[in-house]
Amino acid sequence: MNQMSSVPLYPPPLPPVASSFSGDRGEFRRLVTHGALLELITVGFYRFWLATDIRRHLWSHTALDGDALEYTGRGKELLMGFLFALAILVPIYLAYFLVGLEAERLKAFASVPLFVFFYVFGQFAIYRARRYRLTRSVWRGVRFWMEGSGWAYAGRAALWAVLMPLTLGLILPWREVALERYKMRHSHYGDLQGRFEGTGWDLFKRGWWLWLLGIASVAAPAAIVWLAAVFAPARLALARLATMGNPILILAFLVGGPILYAVFKAVEWRWWLSGIRFGDIRFESTLSRGALIGLYWKVIGWLLLISAVFGGYVYLCMLLVARASQTPMEKLLVSGGLQGNVLFLVLMGIGYLTFILLFNVVMRVYLMRDVWVRLVDSTRVHGFEAVANVSVRGDLASAVGEGLADGLDVVGF
Amino acid sequence: MSMDHSTPLDSPALPKAAGTVVYFDGTSSRRHLVALAFKDRLEFDEAAGPTIAWSYDDIRRADGPSGVLRLRSVTAPALARLEIRDASAASELISRCARLDEQAPGRHGVGAIIGWSLAAAVSIVAVILFGVPLAADRLTPLVPQAFERRVGEVAEKQIKAMVGGETCGDAWGQAAFAKLVNGVRQAAGLDMSIRTAVLISPIPNAFALPGGTVYLFSGLLAKAENPDEIAGVLAHEFGHLKHRDGMRNLIYNGGTSFLIGLLFGDITGSGALIFVSRTLVNSSYSREAEQNADSFAIDVIHRLGRSPKGLGELLFRVTGKDVDKSLSILSSHPLTEDRLARMQAEDRLASGPPLLTDPEWIALKTGCARRGW
């Protein structure tokens, strides 16, 4: 009866398709500013809804093959997850306290190794939190989902973490491969199983020089200090050169550090995205090494600017307090002079809250949204024929994992 | 199935290009290109497929990119989605779906969240101000002495690890100290189980540990000018032991730290906020405990027939000269001026014998106070 569509059901096999992001930057900025404000008003409880809103924005404006993702998680779920996690964490913290007490009784500071337990628990929480987020991600009416054991993952993460200091971090690529393989092997899109095909060697090839520079930046100042100490009595030119070299190195470290980190993140993201597979679908990223450097420097610039404004504000507050209490500035600055001054404390409180509010907005706009956009725009997907007919499978996971990660203050992807 | 046969399907309200409407059935990722029909229910179907109908009242908005109206139905499979890109079709549909934005994502009642958060914050603050002190008071007597001693041993190990752990080894000095301690202890009504020692450290301080240990740092001894001053310090610390303030503080600090952490959660950069509010809350609690210990000390020193004025003067000497408050435990104490004024008001003519003879006092000062730095 009804008139039918004359458009062919599905176009023939496609060339690789780019993923794209269509979100408006101003809209995101308003979202996180508004959210940060509400976070302060609600003493932090709004974070569950803000996290949800941020994900909803990022997901729904990210399109693969023309169809946007959808995030179906809700703030209330995160709140419930957090409350459940509290019920789990409170007894654990108490037990931790009692065990730590016994250990300390045997030897002072013997309880320090107990943090190992929290590291493992944190990894467990990261895995479960990923599972929650994945099961709330929908594309073309089919959910992503995840199985596998959070404890098995946490055990692997902890064992690899032990190797990290032993190899001065050289093992990092192989650690990431092992963990990504576990995570992706247990990730699914409908009835398509995921896997990770990146290799440790591949990441090592792309990033070894970063590792070397990192090691050098720690080793060189130490060597210089050592040289200066050894040759100082002899007053050799070398010793003077060594002491002169340190400030230059520190400057190089301050400028080079963020660049190195941004390059490392770009290399890592590209390698990670290019290793993702779901059935016959293959992801490929063309993110350039320098793609994220600008973002990190913008964050640093904003941070310096906000800090400078905050510094000016503190100075103004002191002037105000000095005028109000009729005490000269010099007297106020004497240690303890401002302690207990209620007006000053209140002004500082307001300033500090504004400071962290702005800081959070900057971090979320640049390091969340802008990084996300660059990653999405750099990604191409091959083998889309395979997704023409994927069946729904898998169950929803609870948000307790996210709550645990929240309670333990760990983040992971 | 439709009563409205007169409505032509190509009415102006309908999208001309059916390809702009995409339907995902929620059971597979297949992309169905469908044509919409606005009848008494929303009907749509694709070539050779069955007709699907959604009641307008069941249709809800789902998250979608800008320019796309993404819909779901509360009675359809949870993930079934209808995506309308055509603006006129979208507005036509919006006008028919009265409950479109019920339970819409993003409309989570900000007012309700703020209200409940404030209620939660008020309740947490109330628990911090009234509940935790009460719990600390009620729980402290229930904590077994053996457990308290264990806590004390831990604190003792850590303190000794930090300051070196060397105690005064001078026989004459020790004998004089033992005599002074004994006198104050009896007047304070404490039994023999308490342990005391002079720890060699330049820091002018003294403290009581849970489980009945009092340490006097030799730095405080060096600043003292007569035995009454040290007796006052000992009586003050014994007051803490008597009230089990160490245990009470532990319970109180643990409880408030946890609750304040809960309150501010993980707003990035809230660490300082948590630290400041914890310090404010805890030090006000500790000031109260200090005041009680001072009252106890005044009482004990009176019982010994001496004047508590010395304690106040010693405290003033310590904080007055050392501006750096951060080194001393005294920062969580009441203002030294107030304490001095209080002790001076309690000044009475000595009715009891001196607590140490002059030679004993000199032995204590020379034997224990001038060592190690």
Image: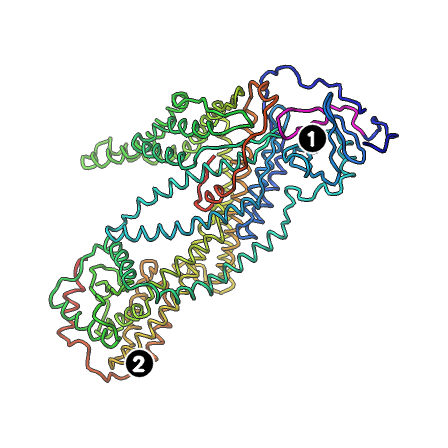
Tell which residue pokes out farthest to the front in this image.
B1
Residue A110 sits above or below residue A208 on the image: below
| Nearest to viewer (mark 1 / mark 2) | 1
Which residue is outermost to the left?
A: B171
Corner quadrant of residue B96: top right
Span of residues in magenta:
B14-33
Q: Quick one: quadrant of the N terminus of chain B?
A: top right
Q: Colour scheme in the image?
A: rainbow
Q: Amino acid at mark 1?
A: Glu
Q: Chain of mark 2?
A: B
Give the residue at mark 1: B83
Q: Quadrant of residue A160?
A: top left
Q: Please state which amino acid type lies under the numbered disc 2.
A: Asp
Q: Residue A88, how many percent across, how many down?
A: 44, 48
Q: Chain of mark 1?
A: B
User: Residue B84, located in which quarter of the rendered image?
Assistant: top right
Answer above or below: position of B174 versus A203.
Answer: below
In this orientation, which residue lies closer to the viewer: B108 or B160? B108
Judge the density around disc 1: few (<14), some (14-19), many (≥20) Cα neighbours within 10 Å.
Answer: many
In 3D space, how far apart are the residues under numbered discs 1 and 2 (Cα atoms)? 87 Å
Q: Tell me, for residue B347, which label it has, or none.
A: 2
Question: Under tag 1, what secondary structure?
Answer: strand
Q: Magenta stretch: residue B19 in it?
A: yes
Q: In the picture shown, does residue B370 fall above or below A72?
A: below
The answer to whether dots 1 and 2 both sit on one chain is yes
